Amino acid sequence: MNGLDKKRSVIGYIFLVPSLVMFALFMFYPLFYTIYLSFFDWNMVKPVKEFVGLENYISVLGDPNTWKIFGNTFLYIVILLVFNFIMPYVLSFILSNIVKKGHGFYKSAFFLPSVISLVVGSILYVWILNPISGPIAIIAKYFGISMPFWSKTEGWVIAVLCIITTWKTFGYNFIIILAGVSGVSTEVIEAARLDNIPMWKIFKDIVVPMSSATGIYVFIITIVQGMQYVFTPIKVITQGGPNYASSNMIYMSYHEAFTLYSTGTSAAVSAMTMALFIILLMLEFKFVEKGVYYEN
């Protein structure tokens, strides 16, 4: 390496310093400090932290409600993968290859909720889905149907919170996937049509594989939405109830820290949530990433 190359290399590292400082300050430090706190008993008020080793982890894993919340978290992820990954894919294919008019209207209509606060959306849905005086309940009464008290009913509460979260995030995922699907070669699709291949097979065997680079991105962020975005409607509407039926791991961590002031337990839950993210990413890289098509 000559002198000019060394100089350019040094300049490059200098330009990276601000980004590295921000990462260290706002990502690495909080991460390691959270893991550090998970080994202590502290309520954010006491001047001294009491070292308890793995007791916080044992306490969390020994609580039967924890396993219920773990199950809720996976259920949120599965439902949102259907609503925010599979459905946008199907709709994008329909708009790109079947529906020929009104693309601008559909894109605007689906994307509009993405710019509205999820807090506002949560409050709006509480009114719309009010089982007594909400507009849907009033319409249902004309047909002799009674609305369930979904915010107090296990099962229903997760389904409705997923619908609220989908209302907010569907449009963004749809626009991203639509861009990927629209980039698939029309010549390949037309050739398949000339061979009388059914549209569902064109979607499954041509469009999905050839737009998989975009699809894998939306797949990952949908998992994040199942963990993170759903926190807002949980906080605004149910506070984890009834009987932890709507709580997830992110809300559990928040509840332990800022409601019960059990910082060590909250940190332990956060560390386990991070471990779950890492496991899911490892599974994704092992079984999904190798089949992604990046030429599009």
Image (cartoon, rainbow, N blue to C red):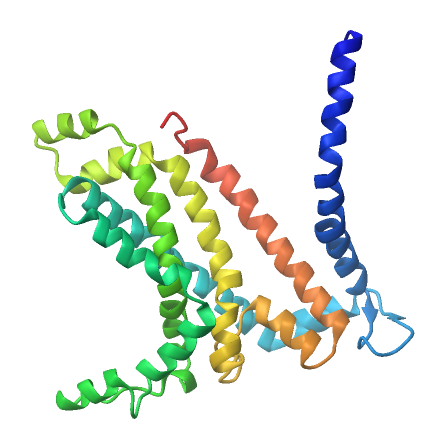
**Residue occupying the point 38% across, 70% down:** 164
Q: Is residue 256 above or below residue 184?
A: below
Left or right relative to 224: residue 97: left
Name the outermost residue toward the right: 48
Residue at image point 24% right, 82% down: 136
Q: Quadrant of the N terminus?
A: top right
Quarter of the figure with the C terminus: top left
Query: Is 295 positioned to the left or the right of 197 in the image?
Result: right
Position of 73 with respect to 104 (left or right) is: right
65 to 36, vertically: above or below? below
Observer able to see residue 203: yes
In the image, residue 166 lies at what x, y percent?
A: 37, 63
- The extreme top residue here reads 2
- Provide residue 210's location: percent of width, then percent of height: 32, 32
Q: Is residue 218 left or right of residue 133?
A: right
Q: Quadrant of residue 189?
A: top left
The x, y position of residue 56, in whole percent, is: 75, 70
Residue located at (41% from left, 35% from top): 213
Task: Residue 35: name its quadrant.
Answer: bottom right
**Residue 107: x, y in percent?**
27, 51
Res. 79 visible in picture = no
Residue 86 lies, with reference to residue 181, above or below; the image says below
